[in-house]
Amino acid sequence: NNGIASFSGLAWTNAAAAITLTLTFSCTGFTPVTHTTSVLPPCAPITAPANGIVGTCVKSAVGTVCTAACLYGFAISGAARTCTADGGGGESTWSGSAQTCDAIASYCPADASVPTNGASAGTCSTAAAVGTTCSVSCNPNFTPSSSVRTCLPGNPALGVWSSSQSCASV
């Protein structure tokens, strides 16, 4: 018989949450071979931060890296977390502290549109904080229709420009 003569010693143990599997293979005329392997349990599921979702935290096996994601108007704060075997009794735990989603200060988006007879979007071509002013640049013999535009508070974090500017002939 070229096959396994006997198969014995299958044992599962669950000592301090680590699962150990031991297999013993015995073949006629050969020394029995025993193989033992341990599998650590996964980390507990991560809960979504306030104003956020679990993001990449759907898997929880040891070695999994987790980063939460935030809803519009909020930014992630805190380092990514890794499911690790802490060595203290075979339990798996998440590294670091829970991530949070913090409100983003209001801002107005860049407005790179160039008005008719305009030379450039001027200082309005970059994002700006609430309260900031900007102005377009006009071609020669043209002037902006108003002196400036102002970034006004919006909802929740996206501000709005007070008006658009055009370029009128002088």
Image (tube, rainbow, N blue to C red):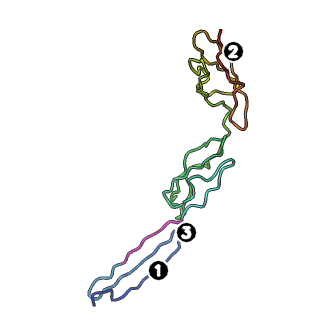
Magenta stretch bounds = 34-41
Q: What SS does tag 2 mark?
A: loop
Label 2: few (<14), some or many (≥20) within 10 Å?
few
Mark 1 and mark 3 residues within 8 Å of each other at the beta carbon? no
Q: Which residue is mark 2?
A: 147
Q: Position of residue 140 (x, y in %)?
A: 58, 10
Residue 11's tag is: 1
Alpha-carbon distance for marks 1 and 3?
15 Å
> At 33% from the left edge and 89% from the top edge, which residue is drawn?
5
Query: Which mark is first along the chain, 3 or 1?
Result: 1
Alpha carbons under labels 2 and 3: distance apart: 70 Å
- Compared to residue 2, the image places residue 62 above or below, namely above
The verdict on residue 39 being magenta is yes
Indicate the amino acid at tag 2. Answer: Ser
The secondary element bearing badge 3 is classed as loop
Vertical comparison of 90 with 100: above or below:
below
Which dot, 2 or 1, sits closer to the camera?
A: 2
**Along the line of sight, the residue nearer the viewer: 62 or 131:** 131
Residue at 64% x, 16% y is 167
Residue denoted by label 3: 17
Q: Nearer the viewer, mark 2 or mark 3?
A: 2
Left or right: 119 in relation to 32: right
Name the amino acid, label 3. Answer: Ala
